[in-house]
Image (cartoon, rainbow, N blue to C red):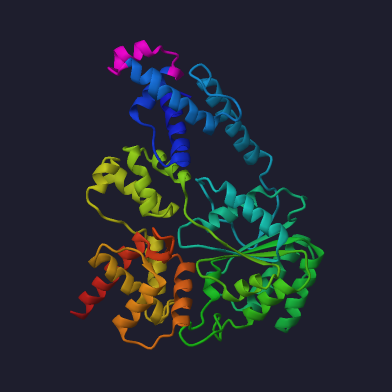
Amino acid sequence: MDVQEAIAYVNELVFAKQGRWLEQPEKVVFESAWLDQSYNDVVKDEGYDLNLLQRRVAPKLWVLLTGILGNGEKVTKKRLRRIIEREMLSLKSEELHLSTNNKSNLSIVGGSIPEIPKFYGRTPEMALLKETLAQERCVVLTGVAGIGKSALAAKLVEAIVPGSFEFNKIIWKSISYGPLLPELVRELLKSINDLLEEKLDLPESTQDRVSMLFSQMQKSRCLIVLDSAESILQGNREIDLNQYGKKYEEYGSFFKRIVEDEHNSCFLLITREPFMDISRLHRKGQAARIIKLDGLGKEGLKIFRSYGLKDEDKWGDLINTYRGNPSSLIMVSKKIKSFFGASVNEFLKFNTILISDILEESLDELFRDNGRLTGLEKQILLCMVEEVTSSSEDVFTFKQLAMKVKEKYNNETSISQIFEAIEALEERSLIEEKTKDNLEIAFGVEPLVIKYITNYHAKKALKCA
């Protein structure tokens, strides 16, 4: 590892710990320690004041790095390089262990897991998902488009050790095509029987097929992953409490049985939309769990580094604007590299926000006529965006929001309905909870959503013109 790689590595750790980057004098002190140079040599080469570096910058830097890197050992000028190289060696050994010893040799049937050429961070999320799958019968992994739900699940599946306490059979199936329940159960039974090398003799009725599936899940500990599970949520949320709609209504009783009946297996549903019936079962203490995946933090900085972006002190601005969404960070990194010579500063001068194709497609599905958002939810979002773009106010308490919506649309909406609409928007990551100076809870709209809504209504106005 050369000195610049070491500075970049420590820079990320400092940003994660203190929310700031190393300042130039700190980098100079770090470099002199790494290269075993005296401060006198640095003063001659860089033109810094010796007293500043030796008595003010260096002592504070060693205290900071001791808290981040020391692991009980005090970081000093002489020890710095050894401590960091030891840390990097430990990280590389752990990565090698995961890639060789923990990679699954299990047969995965029913479909292909997505290939993940690059995967950033997610160590806490991986541990949480692994623990949850071992304890529950049904887990819903939810989050916005491009946030990395399928990637996280795929990496976890790859790490499952054959014959361990976790699972001994894995079925991965994308249901983006929206199969009816009898078709899905038939395909799951076929997949399980292929693994067991048994002949499949299917009963005619759906309930008998479901009972056969439960019998198989009792015999063997299976992990059944249903990717793009939002495809079966086709109910009209405006008028119907049945979130599946008439076409897929059998899934409601199926998942209820998955959660409540005794068996040794687990279903993992990967979805952009919340499964409200499973959320209710979770709140009742049943064997179900909801995990909402948020954006990347400091791990997102590795994306910028992989694309060779400049102006590290501005990388945090990109993470914040795009809320750490990996697909958005990759998209904007490519644009900055291609059109701005990899300069983040030059890109930020244009004061614009870019929306990735996958996120725009997902938002289109939500906002279109008869889409997944109710009329009230759209009204709340539009009201918030109009207030944000026309004034300096960017967060609103519930009381402010309720009054603005009632005043703008002159409707008789009840407070409980507004409560439910705000919760639904928050679950879909369209609005976010914040805390005002007086510690009162308030709500704001994510920058990408503001951009989309502004463009969406501009397009509609052009069509009507």
User: Which quarter of the figure is the C terminus placed in?
Assistant: bottom left
Please give left or right for residue 248 compared with residue 64 in the image. right
Q: Picture quarter containing residue 376?
A: bottom left
The residue nearer to you, when weighing 325 against 174, is 325
The image shows residue 241 at horizontal and vertical percentages of 54, 84
Q: Residue furthest left?
A: 465
The residue nearer to you, when weighing 281 against 346, is 281
Q: Residue furthest right?
A: 219
Query: Image point 41% across, 13% down: which residue?
Result: 37
The residue nearer to you, when weighing 398 against 75, is 398
Please give left or right for residue 345 compared with residue 102 in the image. left
Query: Image point 39% across, 54% down: which residue?
Result: 328
Is there any visible trace of residue 463 in the rendered image? yes
Is there any visible trace of residue 155 in the rendered image? no
The answer to whether 288 is drawn above or below residue 168 in the figure is: below
> How many numbered marks have been drawn onto this rendered protein structure?
0
The image shows residue 206 at horizontal and vertical percentages of 70, 82
The image shows residue 218 at horizontal and vertical percentages of 80, 67
The image shows residue 266 at horizontal and vertical percentages of 70, 64
The answer to whether 306 is drawn above or below residue 406 in the figure is: above
Is residue 47 found inside the magenta-colored segment of the image? yes
The answer to whether 119 is drawn above or below residue 231 in the figure is: above
Q: Which residues are magenta?
A: 33-49
Query: Image point 45% across, 18% down: which residue?
Result: 33
Please give left or right for residue 130 compared with residue 213 in the image. left
Is residue 285 found inside the magenta-colored segment of the image? no
